[in-house]
Image: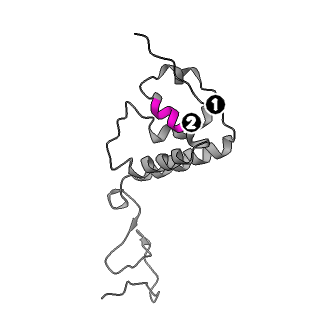
């Protein structure tokens, strides 16, 4: 039995690749609704906030890294706003999947008692320079 053609909102023109991607059709259409449905924006940000914590079916969803490109490939009533919404949601989702700062190789180091202002490695403070320290309870 042939698949039924999807219907997209009348104000949106999709590139040919969207029409061929039947597996992600439902998520595609949810992303398109961000411009006309406030609940779609809430859903988008719920996915973004939980993307790194939950296992979403990547074969059925457009990954957050692709959301800004998705915005650029489609026609919107307000293209700038659609891009801002999708880029912001993408940034939120991808922040959750980044390596924590403690696991990254950085040029900054903090020792116990250095407070909130880390010093650069190899750059000693001049003698007599006051250092910030966290108050101990």
Q: Residue furthest top?
A: 1
Residue marked by disc 1: 12
* Numbered-mark total: 2
Front residue (pair 130, 50): 50
- Quadrant housing residue 110: bottom left
Confirm or deny contact between disc 2 and disc 1 (CB under 8 A). yes
Which color scheme does this rendered protein use?
Answer: one colour
The residue segment tinted magenta is 26-31
Determine if residue 69 is in view: no
In the displayed structure, would residue 129 be above or below residue 85?
Answer: below
Q: CA distance from mark 2 to mark 1?
A: 8 Å
Front residue (pair 72, 112): 72
Q: Position of residue 119 (x, y in %)?
A: 43, 73
Q: Position of residue 100 (x, y in %)?
A: 36, 57
Residue marked by disc 2: 32
| Residue at 61% over, 42% down | 35
């Amino acid at each position: 039995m042939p698949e039924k053609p999807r219907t997209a909102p009348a104000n949106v023109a999709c590139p040919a690749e969207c029409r061929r991607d039947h597996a992600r059709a439902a998520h595609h259409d949810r992303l398109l609704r961000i411009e006309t449905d406030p609940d779609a924006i809430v859903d988008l940000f719920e996915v973004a906030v939980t993307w790194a914590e939950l296992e979403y079916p990547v074969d059925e969803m457009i990954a957050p890294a692709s959301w800004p490109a998705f915005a650029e490939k489609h026609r919107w009533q307000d293209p700038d706003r659609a891009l801002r919404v999708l880029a912001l949601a993408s940034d939120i989702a991808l922040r959750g999947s980044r390596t924590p700062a403690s696991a990254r190789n950085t040029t900054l180091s903090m020792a116990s008692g250095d407070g909130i202002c880390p010093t650069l490695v190899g750059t000693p403070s001049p003698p007599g320079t006051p250092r910030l320290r966290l108050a101990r309870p």
